[in-house]
Image: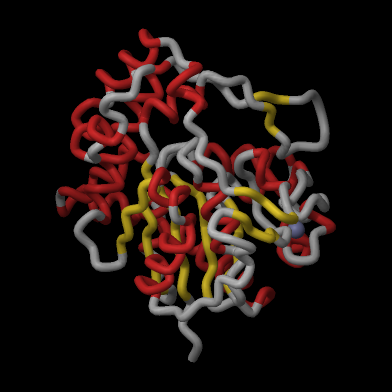
Amino acid sequence: MKSKKVIFIAGFGRSGTTIISHLLGQINEWFCAGEIGMLLERRIYDNGPCSCSAPIQSCPVWSQISSEYTHLTENDVERILQERNTFKNHHCWHQLTKRGRRKLNAKIVEMSRKYANLLSRLFEITGSRVIIDASKMPSHGYLLQSIEDIDLYIIHLIRDPRAVAFSWLKNKKVYDIIKGEPRYFPTLHPIQSAVIWQWWNTTINFMWGRQDRYVRVFYEDFIENPKKTLINIAEKVGEKVNLDFFIDDHMVNMEPVHAIAGNPTRFNSGPTKLKKDIRWLSEMSRYKKFLATIFSSPLLIRYGYLQRYAGRPNL
Ligand SMILES: [Zn+2]
């Protein structure tokens, strides 16, 4: 039987998960599903756009799944959302004790079954060898690791917390709904984003950092040499890949993917330049950089970010 390989991209928001997952989705027989942990039912109910630009209920891939959810009412969707909200990232730490693990595993049975069915349907519909789930949240990764018939690999994507903080200061529009008023992602103060960055990355290290199927990717290295990063990931997953969608080292011919949720860049396709975004160095105030540095310092130092930008005039 063909193995079902799933790559879960873990990391704090604004770390580059959308671009790396879309690139992986360009590989032949690899399917980028986007952030399927972002409450699939809500996305289907709202009939928001897939990354291919079609509404989810009309997309050639997701329409085959959404037809299984048409009976859901607004109340059902709300109830599922509330249920999902009872399992948060901090609950992952309960696995430190035997009792905690038991309680946790009992809590996630139903949620885990749901994602197992979904992944199984996606493999069936797309005929893929590898599915990429860019859901980011450690709690979602915990659900995936409880599914027995998939081979799970973890990509831990890390970006400089000052760059992440700079991005969270921006008022970005949410393009995931068609109905109703336009919405915006919440903004975060640099202290908030630095603390959450530290917390999420610590949790991801704790959960998978010592496992064999774990790959740590620094966004800055990936954007410097994207081919090398993709080849490293493919080697870890045990797949031979052809990267002929690269026009040159930093230019890619992107085919549309069928991804749920993600950064607004998820709708981009065609020739795409992979550019280093270091605007935070010149556009972020020194005070905000200082706060983001201090409140993320233990991991920021451990990940080598102090040395990486040492000597920069704007730091
Ligand atoms: Zn689509």
Let me know if residue 114 appears in the view.
no
Q: Quadrant of residue 296?
A: top left
Q: Percent from the top left, x then y, of residue 55? A: 81, 50
Does residue 298 appear to the left or right of 58 in the view shown? left
Instruction: Choose between 189 and 121: the one closer to the eye.
Output: 189
Q: Percent from the top left, x then y, of residue 295? A: 27, 20
User: Which quarter of the rendered image does ligand 1 occupy?
Assistant: bottom right
The relative height of residue 252 versus residue 200 in the rendered view (above or below) is below
Does residue 284 appear to the left or right of 176 in the view shown? left
The relative height of residue 237 versus residue 133 in the rendered view (above or below) is below
Q: Which residue, as the protein is rendered here, is positioned at the far left?
A: 97
Residue that appears at 82% across and 53% down = 54
Q: Which residue, as the protein is rendered here, is positioned at the far top?
A: 287
Residue that appears at 36% across and 47% down = 218
Q: Quadrant of residue 313?
A: top left
Does residue 213 appear to the left or right of 166 in the view shown? left
